[in-house]
Structures are given as structure tokens and as C-alpha cells.
Amino acid sequence: MSARRPPPTDPLSAAFDAARRAALAGEVPVGAVVVRDGRTIATAHNRPRALKDPTAHAEILAIRAACQILGDERLTGCDLYVTLEPCAMCAGAIAFARIRRLYFGAYDPKGGGVDHGARVFAASSCHHVPEVIGGVRERECGAVLRGFFAGLRGQGGAAPLDPPLG
Ligand code: ZN
């Protein structure tokens, strides 16, 4: 959208590209990228509809793929970039995966589980708390989501007004 957009090697830009691919596929536009030592390990976007799997959120798919690639159940030293505040399920997976640092775009007051709702990382039952940097390029992420849902409503109001995001 802007000439100032960082180069494609920037992980959050890659996550935005993944989110746009999700939108093109009719999924809620959320993208996630796992990075370690400056290298992209895995990229994924939301696919619950395609996979008929309510757990197929971008974060879960990116974590699964990165674990397979690295041959480890834990992603120690890895950072996760997501376009939207993760839900409680994904925040739990992020903790189990031992993600070092979580960067996310827009806050999600309705469906988020990091700064809203369950606040998973603040719970005493959470055994690993990543460093969290939220609200990164928040407006850009919000615009992608709003564009998607505006498009759906324009197609005949198939989308709920306040859908869960991811
Ligand atoms: Zn999620």
C-alpha cells in the first residue's frame, strides 16, 4: 500500500502476504511466520475452511511446520510474527512451543487471548511466557481485515457482523 513498506525479507511483511493469500482463498486473513536467527523457517495462513479443521489457525500451522522442519517439538530461540493478536488456543500453542518472542499486528478485543480475554501468558498455569510486542503495523493489519469483511458483506451479507477473527 505504501512505498515505505519494508522489503519482503521482513517477516511481518511475509505474514501480511500470507494473510492476503488467506483472503484470496476465502479464509479469514491472518498470516504467521516463524523465524530463527534471521531465517524464515515456516510461513502459514488461516485454513480452517480448507482443511475442515477449527484448529487450523495461521499460528498453529506455522508452528507445526516449523517443528517438522527443525525436527523438534519445541521452537526454542524462534520468534513468531502474526498479523493479528493470537487467540487463546494459539497463545497456548505458542507457550508450549517455547517461542522466544511474539510480534503481532492488530489487537483483537473480541477474539484475542494475549492482551484480551483469557490473557493466557498472564495465567499461573502458563509455564513459558514469550516476550510480546503487540500493535506492530496495527493499522495495516486492521485494514486488511476490514477489507476482507467488507468484501464478504458486499457479497450478500454472508459474514456475521462481529466474526471471530483467528
Ligand atoms: Zn488462533
Image (cartoon, rainbow, N blue to C red):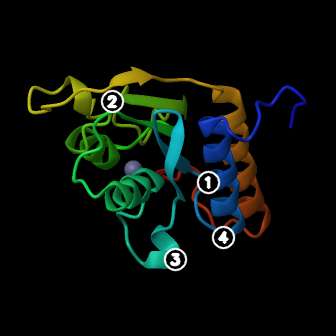
In the rendered image, residue 70, in percent from the top left (x then y), is placed at 34, 54
Q: How far apart are marks 1 and 3 (CA)?
A: 13 Å
Q: Name the residue under label 1.
A: 29
Looking at the rendered structure, which numbered label has been put on residue 100? Answer: 2
Lower sequence index among marks 3 and 2:
3
Q: Nearer the viewer, mark 2 or mark 4?
A: 2
Q: How far apart are marks 2 and 1 (CA)?
A: 24 Å
Image quadrant holding the N terminus, namely top right
**In terms of secondary structure, where does tag 1 sit?**
loop
Q: Looking at the image, is 75 positioned above or below residue 27?
A: above
Crowd band around label 1 with a 10 angstrom C-alpha radius: few (<14), some (14–19), many (20+): many
Q: Distance between the residues labelled 3 and 2?
A: 30 Å
Q: How far apart are marks 2 and 4 (CA)?
A: 30 Å
Q: In which quarter of the image is residue 131?
A: top left
Q: Mark 4 points at which residue?
A: 25
Lower sequence index among marks 2 and 1:
1
- The reply to whether callout 1 and callout 4 are in contact (CB within 8 Å) is no
**In terms of secondary structure, where does tag 4 sit?**
loop
**In terms of secondary structure, where does tag 2 sit?**
loop
User: Is the residue at mark 3 in contact range of ligand 1, meaning its CB lies under 8 Å from it?
Assistant: no
Amino acid on which disc 3 is placed: Ala
Q: Looking at the image, is 111 positioned above or below residue 109?
A: below
Amino acid on which disc 2 is placed: Arg
Residue at position x 25%, y 44% in the image: 97
Outermost residue toward the left in this view = 125
Lower sequence index among marks 1 and 3:
1
Amino acid on which disc 1 is placed: Pro
Q: Mark 3 points at which residue?
A: 50
In the rendered image, residue 2, in percent from the top left (x then y), is placed at 87, 31
Crowd band around label 2 with a 10 angstrom C-alpha radius: few (<14), some (14–19), many (20+): some
Looking at the rendered structure, which numbered label has been put on residue 93? Answer: none
